[in-house]
Image: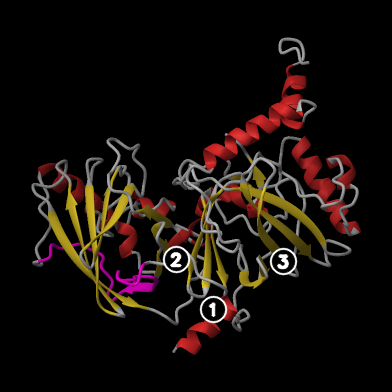
């Protein structure tokens, strides 16, 4: 039981993470019914339409079975010594009220895997030889090349890299490289360099509330920042009830950084 | 041919939400056949600006002539708006599906997702790209748009518009690699009558759509 007037956080924590599982189940089942009124495509390899990750988490942590608490999972991050120091520097700067500017604060594309954490809806679009993922957040666009060809010679390094996809059974596997080094791994503190590669495994499944979701398990490999590859996860419920809205980062960008520091106005 | 299609599916995986065979399929990479910086009517005349339109246009033209680029909203990396996005000198994808028809532009990775709705909303909140619906009229793709803010220019020369602007775009495949298109603009705030301007798109199969980030590369 929570006492709203005395300890509002306890109410929030219970609602969000909870001891009161049945209330959360009830809400998730009601959501799934609402979102399924316009149903998700039936074919397990048909991701076309709109999906939207739940909630907002500024960090990626290694996936474990069984799942660990965030505090325990963070200890499993395979950080090199320099990345550990770099991460601490990011945390310290944020604590001091002078966060180091992340690419999206300048309306740059978020980078991969950073974009996967964005708490805005996305739409998959299929066309011959290509899957296009349209992100509401700052109108990011990902092109997943499905023609079986590797990145062409002289492919430039970019914020979102060059993505090649193929199917392994009902799982869409996306390999991305050719990144620049101007984005972060996650919003909180993790960085990467030019050696970053990301391999995503995206599978459709039905959750216990009758809703349909995509699970994206992505493996991050950058030997200059991590001692070995590690895998994190996000899930994306089907959202038959919504459409992607216009998102203009560039209009009145109140997070625009000054000298590499984000200055929220 | 059947073998080739089967081979493509084997590599690329199955395709979904594809348009029915009896409709023209506009999916592909496209670009304007020539750079259009100033819109003219389909019979080659100046657009029918009213007094307010002429005044606003002259003001913008004077600023541009004086070298003041800041008057053009795209120089602040704001979205080009509808229909100006079409005239940006960059290629774009049309992705036609049963769910929506999508225009994905290289320039500042800007996209429009247009559903096959039958009706426009009564009074949508204005934004840069507006609220659009799509339909086929015979063999022609027709897109109607309202709900546009007045912060964008119609073209590179500074033709103005207000929030009452209605845009009708028409796209007809005249051969597999050519689209003849038109844009009809109705805006009582700045024009004396509705007017139509034409364009031609050519398919660009070999062209890679690049990552284009205005706030990174566009320095004034």
- The location of residue A15, given as percent across then percent down, is 72, 26
The answer to whether residue A147 shows anywhere in this view is no
* Closer-to-camera residue (A18/A26): A26
**How far apart in space, not on screen, are marks 2 and 1 (Cα)?**
27 Å
Q: Chain of mark 2?
A: B
Comparing labels 3 and 2, the label whose residue is closer to the camera: 3
Quarter of the image for residue B119 reads: top left
Residue range highlighted in magenta: B20-42
Q: Are marks 1 and 3 on the same chain?
A: no
- The location of residue A85, given as percent across then percent down, is 87, 52
Q: Please tell me the numbered disc located at residue B106.
A: 2
* Closer-to-camera residue (A93/A178): A178
Kindly identify the residue that appears in the image at 26 percent across and 40 percent down.
Answer: B163
Callout 3 environment at 10 Å: few (<14), some (14 to 19), or many (20+)? many
Callout 1 environment at 10 Å: few (<14), some (14 to 19), or many (20+)? some
**How far apart in space, not on screen, are marks 1 and 3 (Cα)?**
22 Å
- The location of residue B212, given as percent across then percent down, is 50, 64
Q: Earlier in the sequence, mark 2 or mark 1?
A: 1
Q: Which residue is mark 1?
A: B9
Kindly identify the residue that appears in the image at 46 percent across and 87 percent down.
Answer: B2
Task: State yes or no: discs 3 and 2 in contact (Cβ < 8 Å).
Answer: no
Q: Please tell me the numbered disc located at residue A199.
A: 3
- The location of residue A180, given as percent across then percent down, is 66, 66
């Amino acid at each position: 039981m929570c006492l709203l007037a005395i300890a509002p956080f306890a109410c929030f924590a219970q609602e969000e993470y909870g001891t009161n599982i049945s209330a959360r189940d009830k809400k998730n089942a009601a959501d799934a019914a609402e979102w399924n009124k316009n149903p998700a495509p039936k074919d397990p390899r048909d991701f076309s339409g709109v999906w939207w990750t739940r909630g907002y988490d500024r960090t990626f942590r290694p996936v474990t079975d069984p799942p660990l608490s965030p505090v325990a999972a963070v200890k499993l991050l395979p950080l090199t010594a320099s990345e550990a120091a770099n991460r601490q520097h990011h945390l310290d700067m944020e604590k001091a009220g002078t966060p180091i500017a992340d690419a999206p604060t300048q309306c740059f594309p978020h980078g991969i895997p950073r974009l996967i954490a964005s708490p805005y809806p996305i739409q998959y679009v299929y066309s011959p030889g290509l899957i296009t993922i349209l992100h509401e957040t700052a109108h990011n666009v990902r092109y997943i090349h499905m023609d079986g060809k590797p990145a062409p010679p002289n492919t430039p390094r970019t914020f979102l890299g060059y993505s090649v996809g193929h199917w392994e059974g009902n799982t869409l596997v996306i390999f991305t490289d050719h990144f620049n080094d101007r984005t972060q791994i996650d919003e909180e503190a993790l960085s990467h360099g030019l050696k970053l590669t990301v391999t995503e495994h995206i599978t459709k499944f039905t959750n216990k509330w009758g809703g349909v979701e995509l699970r994206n398990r992505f493996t991050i490999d950058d030997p200059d920042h991590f001692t070995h590859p590690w895998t994190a996860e996000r899930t994306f419920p089907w959202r038959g009830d919504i459409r992607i809205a216009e998102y203009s980062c560039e209009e009145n960008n109140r997070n625009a950084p000054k000298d590499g520091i984000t200055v929220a106005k | 041919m059947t073998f080739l299609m089967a081979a493509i599916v084997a590599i690329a995986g199955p395709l979904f939400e594809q348009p029915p065979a009896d409709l023209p399929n506009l999916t592909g990479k496209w670009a304007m056949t020539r750079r259009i910086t100033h819109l003219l009517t389909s019979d080659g005349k100046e657009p029918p600006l009213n007094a307010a339109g002429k005044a606003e246009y002259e003001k913008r033209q004077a600023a541009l002539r004086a070298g003041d680029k800041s008057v053009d909203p795209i120089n602040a990396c704001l979205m080009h708006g509808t229909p100006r996005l079409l005239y940006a000198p960059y290629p774009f994808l049309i992705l036609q599906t049963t769910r929506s028809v999508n225009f994905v532009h290289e320039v500042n990775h800007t996209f429009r997702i247009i559903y096959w709705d039958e009706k426009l909303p009564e009074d949508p909140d204005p934004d840069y790209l507006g609220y659009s619906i799509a339909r086929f009229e015979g063999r022609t793709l027709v897109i109607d748009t309202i709900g546009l803010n007045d912060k964008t220019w119609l073209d590179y020369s500074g033709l103005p518009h207000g929030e009452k602007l209605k845009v009708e775009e028409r796209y007809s495949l005249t051969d597999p690699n050519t689209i003849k298109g038109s844009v009809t603009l109705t805006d009582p705030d700045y024009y004396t009558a509705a007017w139509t301007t034409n364009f031609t798109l050519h398919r660009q199969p070999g062209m890679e759509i690049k990552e284009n980030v205005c706030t990174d590369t566009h320095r004034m």
